[in-house]
Image: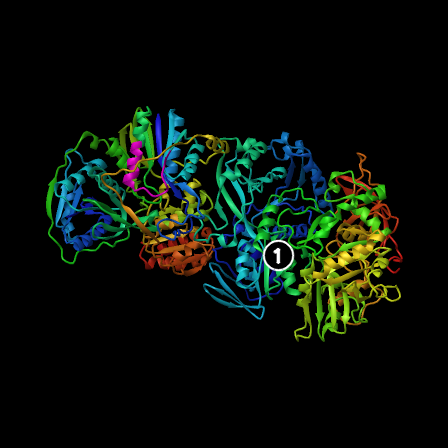
Amino acid sequence: MILTFVEQAAGRPDRSSLEALTFARRLAAAQGVPLGAVLFGPAAEVAAAVLGAYGVVEAHLVEPAGLDAYAPAVWGRSVAQLVGASPPTVVLAAGTDRGQEVLAYAAAMLDAPMAANCIDVRPGEPFEVTRQRWGGSLLEKARLDGPVRLLTVAEHVTQPEEAAVPTTVSISRFTPTLSEADLRVRVIGRVAPEPGKVSLADARVVVGGGRGVGGAEAFSELEELAGLLHGAVGVSRVVTSAGWRPHSQQVGQTGTRIAPDIYIACGISGAIQHIVGCKAAKAILVINTDREAPIMSRAAYAVIGDLHTVVPAVSAEIRRRQAL
Amino acid sequence: MNILVCVKRVPETGGRVTLSADAREIDTRYLGFTVSPHEECATEEAVRLVEANGGSSTVLTLGPEAAADQLRAAMAIGIDRAILLETDGQDWDPVATAAAIVDAIRAEAAAGVQYDLLLFGNEAADSGDFQVGIRVAIALGLPCINGVKSLEIKDGVATARREAGGGWEVFQVPLPAIVAVREGINLPRYPSVPGRLRAKKKEIERSVPVARQAGAAGPEKIRLSLPAESEGRAEILGTGADAAPAVVDLLERIGVLA
Amino acid sequence: MIGAGIVGNSMAYHLARQGWRDIVLIDKGALPNPGGSTGHASNFIFTTDHSKEMTAFTLDSVRQYKDLGVFTQSGGIEVARTPERMEEFKRRLASAHAWGIEAELISPARIKELVPYIEESILLGGFYTPGVGVVDSLRAGTLMREAAVEMGALTVSAMTETTGIDVVDGRVTAVRTDRGDIQTETVVIACGIWSPRIARMAGASIPLTPAVHQMISVGPVPAFADTVGEITFPIVRDMDTNMYERQHGGDLEVGSYAHRAILMSPDEIPSIAESAQSPTELPFTDDDFDVQMEQALELVPEILRDERVGVRYAINGLLSLTPDGMPILGETPEVRGLWSVAAVWIKEAPGIARTVAEWMTHGTPDIDPHSSDIARFYDHHRVAAHIDARSAEGFNKTYGIVHPMEQWNSNRNVRLSPINTRQRELGAVFFEAAGWERPFWYGTNESLLAEYGERVMPRAAEWESRWWSPIINAEHLAMRDRVGMVDLAAFAIFDATGPGATEYLQGLVVNQVDVKVGRVIYTPLLNAAGGIVADLTIIRLGRDHYRVVTGGGMGMRDKKWFIDHLPADGSVQVHDLTSALYTIGVWGPRARDLVQSVTSADLSNAAFPFGTARTVDISGVRTLMSRISYVGELGWEIYAPMEQGLKLWDVLWAAGQPLGVVAVGIGVYAVTGRLEKGYRAHGNELELDFNLVEAGMARPSVKDADFVGKAAYLVQRASAPAAILCTLTIDDPTSASGVRRYMLGREPITTPDGGFLVNSRGRRSYATSAGSAPSIGKHVLMSYLPPEYAIEGTKLAVEYFGERYPVTVAIVGSRPIFDPENTRIRA
């Protein structure tokens, strides 16, 4: 059995989890073993029901007693105990914050190895995995061995794909045995996103600013354009290191990974740490004074010019057309 | 309060990574070394917490002799002590790394040094394993919060926040605890000249870690490779403000203009 | 144009201005900062250099940067921690005065006023140049590149790597790149530290080495919090520690030339892909900077002791070093159409680019680039062992107090005279020229000091007795009294032969070469604008056979000039005989007696008059004797095969013993003997900057044949000279403290009350040469003076180490101060 940790919100599996499921199904097929899933939280049952489309035959709904909030050690303990209950050979999760975290807990509790951010796995004894290092700017081939093998699947690499033949999902409920220690770490509060604010990771349009923006004040032009496009502003590490913008807007290896339909990169040279954060964009439009900037080779489109001229002109053009 | 920060020496990569001839390592002939940005922030956080609450900070790394440079860099911004678990330079997998850190912390405890807070980076810049802090936490029976971008310590309780879905999740754990931080929790200071000179003169406590023999191991690196890049030439939409209509046409075409 | 740093961009602009079109500028990096040394330069410009050439390049660059609007004037202070440095500043002030730069010596208190964060208690004083400033070199490059594009002259192709240079029949034909090939007859290598690699693709050599210059930047500096713009406070150069400290916005940059020389091979430079920051910004090696850090703390403690001020950036920046510290400019001798503009720093780049663009276009640059000419190198200069040794030795002299005669320690004994063993036996003190070890004086001649007593003009001051000995003047006097033998192994010698030889040389040199076989011609060479390119002697050995003899220092450059002007029809060949022929000079009243005693040939004045040459057998050695003299005495230059040099020397030396022969060093040959005779030297009196009329070298008539520069020369002859070369004598060398001081050259000439002499072409008067004239018991100078001062008997002054010494204009024009009728030479 291959067990996949599926994240869901309001009964809808997360896209990253569907990517991981697609990855897991291929591995299961290659190994000739069934595909299972484990889900947590309210509406997990609704989400589990649709997983048949992805080839899941068995879904475990974990219902920790009296715990609705996210609690990584509890979730990790649950996965570890599920593994103990019906030994799967492999446990997978998406390479998301929670995916990495829950699997790392499970791995530590099982004393099993874990390979993070895999993009490929060659089943065999041992597994040969290909995983991302350096945020994806480097790949590592590695052996993954042991009675239980845990791995997370790098985001934005595998396209979610439904199974050719849908399966019927059999749903079972699982109540883990928890200790006090497992319960210590849990979400005790939330700060909701600002209303109307588009999250950088989910934005369909990201307007990016780099060193070329020139200073903290000059970002208002980018904000305006992002607002018109219902998108978000993202920045390079130079910008956050200089204190021009908060780190929450950083796109890159140590910031946010974005996957918008279009990334409008203004005054950004294209350091590798930034590129790994934006390379999942469907298209990159560069606005730069220099047609020979390194980022140009990553771009589908470019405007040669000073961003302080071009960006306001684009905003004005959008407003003009909207007024028609 | 007593704080331990765990860091890892990694090459300071820039434009593009190139590999050694055997494709086992990054070619570092021309590169400097640093620690991951997350760990720079963890170090800064340790210094700030000690500045605010008193106590002492220690930096620890598992790595080659040359990793002393990274320990000195940490001491240059105000870390008090440094511990080097000296290896022969080969990569240790995350399981073995965590075990060596656990051994070191137990040795410290045996010598009477108790840590209230263990800080890690959320993941190492190079290997990106996302698990060393959690493995240490499980081994030591400590609570562990990952991905932390805001940390408050009050009355023996750590309150930590991390980003989630555009908002924040809040955690609270009693000390001692492990916190794995992310870049952005603070803006690390640069070392001052007197700080650097002081760090030069400080002792580094060295020991040789013993590799764990039993239990899990891996992942075990075979070789590295560079991902295939599709490099193209961008389609030039225009120059200066005159390009605005072409840009908006494009935005319409891909359907992001409501 | 390969390379889009400050040099390549400036070159593209200046070539476009000179009318070039269809220029392609390529660089393997991205723009505007392709990753070369320009990208990490500290970008400040101190204007005063002891070298006239470098100062001219720098001043022209400052003008250009100002025109581009990228220059921010901040002023600059070079500070002294030692008394030696304070003395050096006086000398520096003299150079500033000679080259027309506003500067002053200031007290520690005044330094503190200008730079409030400095610790002035450790300083003795400063050299303040108000006109110092910083530039935005990337912006300057971009503006010049864009201007060239605007003119329709330039296509830019970045991220284009040069993979090869095609050469056919010694001429460039194409550049190959990873994005296609470019057919071209002219290629400019402006590749900084990569230049040797690129030149090698064409089979040419650019002898420079990449070297590390360490720099850190600290901030934010509270003292800079309220300042606006990049720089408000003067830049400080801490000369005695080889460091600089300069404001850069809210930060302070501290750079060093004090650490060990860290050289790299051009082949080891990382690629753009391999580098974390850029190929020229390598990881900082902080152990190398430790000592400098402490020294910087002493000077700017207020900033560097502040715990809030952090080290924000630290690099080992790569820059170019050359074996003699000068840039490498001009067409490579190996490949026609392949030009080098390398080892150029920010401060001089636009000026050099203008110069080279003029040179490429019409061959007559405004600023004389001879010290930077790539053709100056011999093969022994082009090997890594030499480049590395000298670059390493020179690195720590970047801010050094370098004596004008200072000798290199490394890589010596590279070229030895065949009589080297004899020279050592005679206690020779060797100075190096073009790799040759030349005795500057002979220790065994110390015995002559007693003979001449005070006439050797002993020097009490340490500075001018450094690299000097009174033995030089004793050898001089003994030669004038008896006879001296001079080793002249360093001569560069080449023959021009073939049916077109006479016509070829007639078209190349100023004086008549169509003379009787056996005549010796001394002649200057001009460029098309009438600037002086060289001076040398030519011996007509046959109808179609001439021998050119020139100084070793400029020999390869002169040879290239000859080769460049060869007729295309192959009717003339030039053969380099430098390593085949050895030369001994025998001069003095007893020279004829000496040589006559070992030959049966008739050496009488009637049989062998001045200005002739002939084959003479000397005791079994067949020689060519040429009766000329650079020291103003009866005698000959005697040429023999290199391998017979030792035998020839031994024969003559033995013959000279009864006559009291002395071995005479280059101190006499190149300085004292020459100065007493008013002989001009290339690089001193003779430069593109001056013409033959000013130099007093215009002959009464001009030959009929056309020659390079003739038209300009005729115009010069028809106009009043803006300055006239004069010989001046020091009236009283006694300083205020009662020590006799002797100038070494390049000092400003002033009116008695200190007013600078500026001629109608804006050039200031300075001592082009200086040295003892032991025969007349005076110290003499040569200087170009405006006509109103060029009157014999005029009282003037010379500025030396902050004092003025009275001088008198002794000679106007080329008449010798010693033996004005030349009776000795013609004896």
Which residue is at the front of the view, C649 or C554?
C649
Q: Quadrant of residue A286?
A: bottom left
Q: Quadrant of the image for the C terminus of chain A?
A: bottom left
Residue C388, percent from left and from top:
57, 50
Determine crowd level at label 1: few under 14, some 14-19, many 20+ residues with C-alpha closer than 10 A. some
Instruction: Kindly identify which chain the residue marked by label 1 belongs to.
Output: C
Give yes or no for residue B75 being in the magenta stretch.
Answer: no
Whether residue B169 is visible? no
Q: Quadrant of residue C608?
A: bottom right
Which residue is at the front of the view, C75 or C122?
C122
Q: Which residue is mark 1?
A: C380
Number of dots carrying numbers: 1
Whether residue C51 is visible? yes
Residue A200, percent from left and from top:
33, 46
Q: Is residue C275 above or below residue C510?
A: above
Horizontal side of residue A236 vs C286, given as left or right = left
Q: Looking at numbered disc 1 in the image, what kind of residue is underneath it?
A: His
Horizontal side of residue B85 vs C192, given as left or right = left
Q: Quadrant of residue B229?
A: bottom left
Secondary structure of residue under mark 1: helix
- Provide the residue span drawn in magenta: B84-103
Residue C3, percent from left and from top:
53, 58
Horizontal side of residue C465 vs A290, given as left or right = right
